[in-house]
Image (spheres, rainbow, N blue to C red):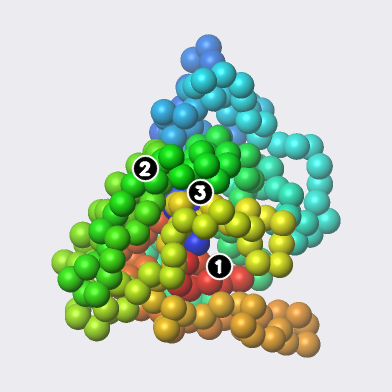
Amino acid sequence: MMTLSLTWGLLSWLALAAPAPAPAAAPGGGTEGVPDGLRCLREAYPDAFCGVTATSLERCGGGALPWDDGREKPDHDAILEDPDLEEMMRQRYTPFVPATAPPVDFEPGRVRWTPFFMALYGDSRAAVRKELVPVPWLEKCGGTVVQFNRRHGAAAALAAVERDLARELPPDLCRLAAKSSGTFNWRTVRGTSRRSLHSFAIAIDIGVSRSDYWDWNKPDAAGHYRYKNRYPIEIARIFERHGFVWGGRWYHFDTMHF
């Protein structure tokens, strides 16, 4: 998922996966009081956001996105359903580390404020369709062409992933990665009112035959889900190299999702 997914798909793709940036100047030149998360978003999307204040992200075309809605949510599920930017950026994504069971409800990149992504990638099915470009996907291994959002470097990042996968993966993993289950699909996340990052064509699902998904399992007596992952870490690390979030690093895991 290029979610800031990223599936983060994309983040959310660049911002959530990126290392901490240098401080961005707020209007007037100062940085004091500007939350790190706002600085990160400003640095990750300089063509979309031209400034920050202590309370908002300033859009280059006018208007602002608020950092904090001032409401305390009772639990993680409530945050997932109705987050703000501050809650979206609370958890930091760490790429390249081994795939181990995350702490309960630790899932950076899964909490997403939809108006942020609408501002970046399109606010309707038709608006996103206008931004789609073809990206050849591992055709030498049986893949095809997929459609991805060109805005803010998303399609270019996916093309870079494809080149590295084609060059570095052994034949069996290349064939696995070549099997895409989709990119663009204007929809909500199943069973929720949350908009999927596939709506913005900044997420891709691949290798479903080796994937695991939290909701395919039953929780234990305490309501917790046991982490499962059969997905090749080699594939995940190549996606992470180019700024994608991997759903295999979430407590509510979705291992085919980038």
What residue type is disc 2 on? Arg
Task: Give residue 183's mark.
Answer: none
What residue type is disc 3 on? Phe
Q: Earlier in the sequence, mark 1 or mark 2?
A: 2
Q: Secondary structure at mark 2?
A: loop
Q: Residue at x 66, y 28 (%)?
A: 55
The residue under label 3 is: 200
Nearest to the observer: residue 142 or residue 64: 142
Q: Is residue 150 above or below residue 249?
A: above
Tell me: 219 left or right of 149. right
Nearest to the observer: residue 117 or residue 11: 117
Q: Is residue 23 visible?
A: no
Q: Residue furthest front?
A: 126
The residue under label 2 is: 150
Q: Earlier in the sequence, mark 3 or mark 2?
A: 2
Q: Position of residue 226 (x, y in %)?
A: 62, 83
The residue under label 1 is: 250
